[in-house]
Amino acid sequence: MASRRALAVAAGAASALAGSIWLAWHLWRRHAAQRAERELLELFGQVKAASNAVLLVVSNARSTAFSAPNLSKYLRQKGLVPSGDLLRDARALVALVESQQGGRRAAFGHELLKHTIDPKRLDRLFPDIKASYVQQPLDYGRNSRYGDNWRISCYLVVMDNWKPKIMPHEPMLHCLSDVMYECVAKFEKWYSLLRGYRPGAVSFSVMNAFVTRYRPIHGEDELKKHIDGSNVDGSVILALPTDEPFEGGELHVWDGKPRQE
């Protein structure tokens, strides 16, 4: 009997120990979930304070919490690999946003860079640029301020479905293709830094490329205020040499909200 009682006490003690372990494990999981929930709220608040635009992309429909699919998609767009764990991915997002704010970024969505392409190289190319240049008249249609009056550009690249339709001028493409692709590489580096993309994570391609010759002649002296296009992520404007001295000449950029010139 004593032996049986001892076994019963031992079994009862083992059962109580197992129950205590299960209860402790259950309480630990609940506290861990609560800590994770609190941290997610804090991380969500940090993203909200840093960038409302990013918040709208990574949050749910009501913008009250992170959306796991939206957050994963955004991290992939930035060249990162999502872990599948919401808390870890939220931490990665906050680190990304903080790095964007702490790194060197242009004050606006544009920047003036001097000597991006070697000026001596452009001087050597200039005679061939002039020899390759031909005016290619365009008809933008009656809804454009220019209608069929724009005729001072010569095209290297034209996107397939662009209207008005114009064919690239092969001599100009042959002359400046290397310079054009070097500009693309410079733009990729600048744009990736501006937007927080990992270098090489996003591919860039040329939609339209052209050489425009401005002269002090009515209809050839300016391109008025315009938008390059809603489907254009950015533009590179390269100043070419000239052998005709001039005074004046400006490039105006409207950037930011409210409008700033």
Image: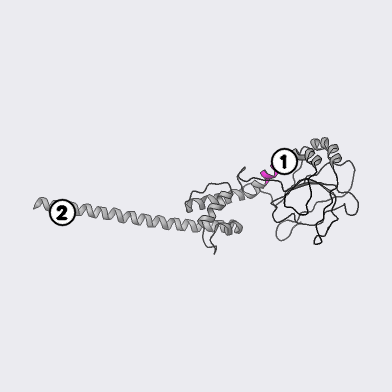
Instruction: Give the percent coordinates (x, y) of residue 168.
Output: 78, 45
- Where residue 134 sits, quadrant-wise, is top right
Q: Tell whether 33 sits left or right of 205.
A: left
The residue carrying pointer 1 sits among few (fewer than 14), some (14 to 19) or many (20 or more) residues within 10 Å by Cα, namely few
- Distance CA(mark 2)–CA(mark 1): 83 Å
| Residue 186 belongs to the span the image colors magenta | yes
The residue carrying pointer 2 sits among few (fewer than 14), some (14 to 19) or many (20 or more) residues within 10 Å by Cα, namely few
Residue at the location (58% across, 51% down)?
Answer: 97
Which label sits on residue 97? none
Q: Are marks 2 and 1 in contact (CB under 8 Å)?
A: no
| Residue 50 belongs to the span the image colors magenta | no
Q: Tell whether 202 sits left or right of 8.
A: right
Q: Which residue is mark 2?
A: 8
For the residue labelled by badge 2, is the local secondary structure a helix, a strand or a loop? helix
Q: Which residue is mark 1?
A: 181
- Identity of the residue furthest to the bottom in this view: 62
The amino acid sitting under disc 2 is Ala
For the residue labelled by badge 1, is the local secondary structure a helix, a strand or a loop? helix
Instruction: Give the percent coordinates (x, y) of residue 250.
Output: 83, 51
Q: Tell whether 146 sits left or right of 228.
A: right
Q: Which residues are magenta?
A: 181-190
The amino acid sitting under disc 1 is Tyr
For the image shown, how many numbered marks are present on the structure? Answer: 2
Residue at the location (78% across, 38% down)?
Answer: 174
